Image: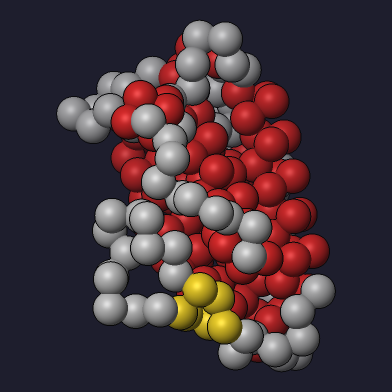
Amino acid sequence: MPGLVQPVSDESEALLAYLAQQRYVVRLAAFGLGDDQARSTPSPSALSVGGIIKHLAAVERFWMQVVRGELEDAGSDSGHDYEDNFRLLPSEELASVMDDYAAAGRETEATVLSIADLSRVVYVPHSVPWFPPDVDYWTLRWVLLHLITETARHAGHGDIVRETLDGATAFPLMAAAERWPASPWIRAWEPAS
């Protein structure tokens, strides 16, 4: 996938394309990392690249459960489970978390494409403490825009964590991942020898 979203023909396609682009940027932060690096937290934050990816997979699944009306009580996880959602645990591998994130993305796309109207009502699960108590529903359009925003926010976190780990930044990582030809504008990331 190139650095920019390709032209789109309608709103659903546009929203899904921008979400896919942000997922791709998040995944780039993990390019070339091993499991230990992916679970490392080198910045003042407790976030790791692997933990961010794991969290975003859970976020997409949560929202698609909300969209499909399958979520009975969103507040049932313990605080420990919630925190583990942001960590690549010692028993987890980056490759499996990356695969799970890709699967979550496919599930999101299938759910969204199964609904003809982006104005479809999505009820707010009031058991989530940061959801407004005075709002009863959003729309599928709102949910997709929220997912794009959430993913973009964490893509930035991933960029900072990755740069702190080994100095790699988004465009050199993209150049390496996509095998761009040599250019006077950008040099592809290479692992330290």
| Count of marks, rendered view | 0
User: Among all residues in the image, which is located at the extreme left?
Assistant: 44
Q: Is residue 20 visible?
A: no
The percent position of residue 164, horizontal first and vertical second, equals 31, 29
Identify which residue, 1 or 72, lies in the foreground. Answer: 72
Residue 158 falls in image quadrant: top left
Residue 161 visible at all:
yes
Q: Is residue 134 above or below residue 73?
A: below
110 on left or right of 40 = right
Placement of 192 over or under 72, stated as above or below: above
- Pick the front one: 80 or 100: 80
Residue located 53% across and 35% down the image? 54
Q: Position of residue 39 (x, y in %)?
A: 44, 19
Q: Nearer the viewer, residue 109 or 176?
A: 109
Where residue 154 sits in the image (x, y, percent)?
A: 40, 49
Task: Name the quadrant of the N terminus.
Answer: bottom right
Residue drawn at x 61%, y 50% as measured from the top left: 61
Residue reaching furthest front? Answer: 72
Residue under the point 48% across and 40% down: 55
